[in-house]
């Protein structure tokens, strides 16, 4: 199936995203993941991996939204390719891109595509080329909360924006009460938690709020550092999730697996569809179905539809990328880079994602990534 640029991805191709029981993405930042990849199938998974000249050490860093997947991929790849060491540091999207553009790592993981200035910066490292975005996995960002007696909280983009911008500070605010008739909302202060580190998760939340509630979120939608006043900061999605879990009257944002692992209630989003939409892998996949490829050439950066009102489509989503040079990669690490990314994007690598709580790539996108990786030079 040919991938058409500037056209919505076919919904049928997105079927691969729906993984029953998947916890989806872990986080973006310097996090310790709360669930470990399933290592029981390592031997079987490693048996079909092609090493293709891989050798020595491969350094990478970035988003920990993909850390559980990375842990599993690295374990399988190293088991198959003797003498190879892949070292991925989950330091956050911003940190990974910085290291990549400083030439410290062979590739970076990011929950958002490179900005124009970051692409320009990458040309100093990618001699004769530039950094490109290769999507790997996708899923929902949950809005988690702790509020005794309220188990089915509904918010819309406007109220979410006002809460995180400290314009709504009480749980029984009329805007929240209107969305939750019959709920026993307390007259207590909302404790809103956000990321303290640079984060693609923060950036995707900002893009969603700027698109779906532009009148209520006036901050830079491209900001990876928290742009709004007030609130309380915590390091990484794990830090935000822990803060929400421990504090009554709190609310925060993090990848769905953190809500599941910590048994944190999540907000249903009123998108304007017939019914509020829950944060699930299946519902996120319906929103990702409207994605468009905005990158050119070898770049597969996606444009996501954060304002979707499609029935059952959860709009607060992210796709996580591997960022590598299309040309100008270091000769000593190029074979290992290509072999590892070939495995990760290949059928074997994508097949094991559900064991780590992720959703595999849509078939169309996966096919395109598999065509591009062997061309890296």
Image: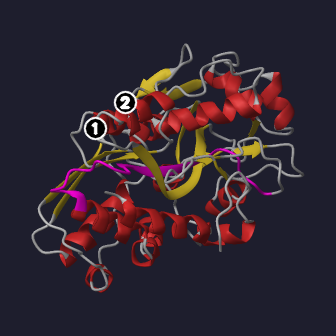
Q: What label does residue 135 carry, if any?
A: none
Residue 320 among magenta residues: yes
Q: Residue at x 11, y 62 (%)?
A: 56
Q: Secondary structure at mark 2?
A: helix
Q: Position of residue 256 (x, y in %)?
A: 54, 52
Estimate the x, y position of residue 235 in percent, counting from the top left: 37, 32
Is 283 in front, or is 368? 368
Please check the rendered image and state whether residue 92 is part of the magenta-colored stretch, yes or no: no
**Depth check, front residue: 317 or 187:** 317
Q: Position of residue 105 (x, y in %)?
A: 24, 45
Q: Which residue is mark 1?
A: 125
Q: Quadrant of the N terminus?
A: bottom right
Left or right placement of residue 218 versus residue 220 in this view: right
Classify 275 as above or below 271: below
Residue sitting nearer the eye, 266 or 339: 339
Residue range in magenta is 312-334
How far is the residue under mark 2 from the one under mark 1? 8 Å
Q: Residue at x 39, y 45 (%)?
A: 63
**Residue farthest along the front direction in this orientation:** 128
Pick whichever, 291 or 269, lies toward us: 291
Please tell me whether residue 200 is drawn above or below residue 57 in the rendered image: above
Residue 121 tag number: 2
> Residue extending furthest right?
274
Question: Can residue 262 be seen in this snapshot?
Answer: no
- Where residue 100 appears, as percent x and y from the top left, is 30, 40
293 over 370 or under it: above or below: above
Contact, mark 2 vs mark 1 (Cβ under 8 Å): yes
Label count reads 2
Determine whether the residue tagged by mark 1 lies in a helix, strand or loop. Answer: loop
Name the quadrant containing residue 335.
bottom left
């Amino acid at each position: 199936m040919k991938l058409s640029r500037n056209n919505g991805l076919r919904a049928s191709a997105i079927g691969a995203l729906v993984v029953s029981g998947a916890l989806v993405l872990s986080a973006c930042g310097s996090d310790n993941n709360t669930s470990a990849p399933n290592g029981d199938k390592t031997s079987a998974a490693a048996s079909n991996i092609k090493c293709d000249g891989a050798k020595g050490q491969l350094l990478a860093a970035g988003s920990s939204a993909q850390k559980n997947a990375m842990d599993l991929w690295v374990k399988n790849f190293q088991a198959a390719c003797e003498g190879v060491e892949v070292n991925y540091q989950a330091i956050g999207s911003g940190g990974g891109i910085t290291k990549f553009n400083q030439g410290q790592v062979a590739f970076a993981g990011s929950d958002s595509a490179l900005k124009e200035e970051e692409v320009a910066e990458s040309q100093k490292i990618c001699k004769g080329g530039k950094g490109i975005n290769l999507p790997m996995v996708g899923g929902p960002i949950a809005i988690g909360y702790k509020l005794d007696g309220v188990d089915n909280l509904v918010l819309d983009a406007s109220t979410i924006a006002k809460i995180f911008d400290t314009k709504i500070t009480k749980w029984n605010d009329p805007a929240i009460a209107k969305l939750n008739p019959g709920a026993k909302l307390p007259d207590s202060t909302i404790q809103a938690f956000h990321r303290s580190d640079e984060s693609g998760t923060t950036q995707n939340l900002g893009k969603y709020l700027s698109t779906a509630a532009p009148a209520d979120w006036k901050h830079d939608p491209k900001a990876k550092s928290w742009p709004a006043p007030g609130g309380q900061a915590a390091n990484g999605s794990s830090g935000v999730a822990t803060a929400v879990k421990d504090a009554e009257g709190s609310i925060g944002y993090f990848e769905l697996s953190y809500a599941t692992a910590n048994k944190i209630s999540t907000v249903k989003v009123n998108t304007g569809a017939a019914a509020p939409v829950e944060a699930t892998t299946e519902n996120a996949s319906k929103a990702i179905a409207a994605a468009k490829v905005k990158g050119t050439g070898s770049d597969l950066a996606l444009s996501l539809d954060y304002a979707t009102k499609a029935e059952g489509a959860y709009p607060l989503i992210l796709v996580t990328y591997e960022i590598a040079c299309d040309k100008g990669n270091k000769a000593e690490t190029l074979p290992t880079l290509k072999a590892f990314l070939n495995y990760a994007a290949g059928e074997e690598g994508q097949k094991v994602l559900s064991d780590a709580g992720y959703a595999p790539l849509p078939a169309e996108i996966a096919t395109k990534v598999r065509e591009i990786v062997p061309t890296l030079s």
